Amino acid sequence: MPAKITAYKAPMRRALQLALNGPAFGVNPQVGAVLINDSFEILAEGWHMGSGTDHAEVAALKDLALKGISPVGLTAVVTLEPCNHTGQTGPCAQALIQAGVAKVVFAVADPGDASSGGAETLRHAGIEVISNVMAQEASEQGRVWLTANRLGRPFVTLKWAASLDGRSAAEDGTSKWISGPQSRADTHLRRSQVDAILVGTNTILVDNPELTARKPDGSLYEHQPLRVILGETKIKRKYRVFNDDAETVQYETHSIHGALAELWQRGVRHVWVEGGAKVASKFAKLGLVDEILVYQAPMLLGGERTSIRNLGVDTMAEAIALEFKEVRALGNDVFIRAVPAAPANERSARKKGAN
């Protein structure tokens, strides 16, 4: 990488840190931005705080104005290509042009049909544009929103807790508690950062879960994901999943593609699939899993209650290859984050026609 480009890595790293201040859930991405001078000194910062609020670039420009500094001739460093459309707020590309910045540096391109094209607009206005600075880091951090918008469906995280031999429950059906308190706390924190939690009807009938995101003290996180029940079995309102702590919907269908399409229309961009083995296996078999989270406990259970059932894999050559992204101790458990080795569009193409 040329020395000139390398110099932008420090402000881009700061912009990526700022992006994490915004909500991980919702239809909008986490974006951070900084404004720097020719000495690469950060003069202002901003991040997107959620739907309907200023985008990161505009927030940084407002921060600069509060400090009484002119934006003319400065460089904007942004984690995502400045948007090029008017939604609940105006286009960031135009805001940067009107501010008089001389250069825009961004990490990854906007995959949206309506919102992309900001870089071209900026260039036509005479602004120098540099792209792909720390693109790999930005793509990893923003993988949920980027993947969802590239595919036009919610990003799917498949999660389970299991014994060392891959069992999700004992033979009598009991599963509390396979994972330890640190793993459960991590699970609930991650629940609070997604748009929806999805389970099958059998999980509701057998486990009667609340499917809420709770802090270690038992109180609820401010954001509660939509609770989604998938399956044709009628679920009575007596179950805890229908309490007032969060909204609940049931899709009385076995069509996972159909359910994901419905959720996309509701603004859901991240679905957390938590149970049970039948539903989890169907998502995996259809090539619709983008990320797998496993909390593996140091115990042996044996028996038939595996976390994943039949995937249609008859030989080793048909195995669904995964890539470990994260493996670490979490209390007495081991936390594993893995992703399919094949791209999502390739996985889905292999299962074309399945439903």
Image (spheres, rainbow, N blue to C red):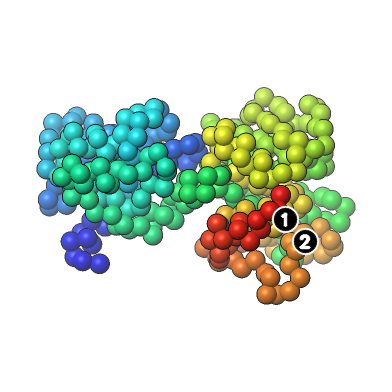
Question: Residue 175: x and y, percent?
Answer: 78, 50
Q: Residue at x 71, y 27 (%)?
A: 243
Q: Label 1: which residue?
A: 281
Question: Residue 57: x and y, percent?
Answer: 28, 38
Residue 95 shows up from this direction = yes
> Mark 2 or mark 1, which is nearer the start of the sequence?
1
Where residue 268 sits, quadrant-wise, is top right
Q: Which mark is residue 248?
A: none
Q: Nearer the viewer, residue 299 or 110?
A: 110
Task: Identify the secondary structure beneath mark 2.
Answer: loop
Q: Residue at x 33, y 40 (%)?
A: 83
Q: Residue at x 55, y 48 (%)?
A: 155
Residue 225 shows up from this direction = no
How busy is the neighbourhood of tag 1: few (under 14 within 10 Å), some, or many (20 plus)?
Answer: many
Task: Identify the secondary structure beneath mark 1.
Answer: helix
How busy is the neighbourhood of tag 2: few (under 14 within 10 Å), some, or many (20 plus)?
Answer: few
Q: Relative to residue 345, is residue 54 drawn left or right? A: left
Q: Relative to residue 354, is residue 217 drawn left or right? A: left
Alpha carbon distance from label 1 to label 2 = 7 Å
Contact? badges 1 and 2 (CB < 8 Å): yes
For this orientation, the residue located farthest to the front is: 353
Q: Nearer the viewer, residue 176 or 318?
A: 318
Q: Which mark is residue 310?
A: 2
Question: Disc 1 residue type?
Answer: Ser
Q: Residue at x 43, y 31 (%)?
A: 51
Question: Disc 2 residue type?
Answer: Asn
Question: Residue 288: x and y, percent?
Answer: 62, 53
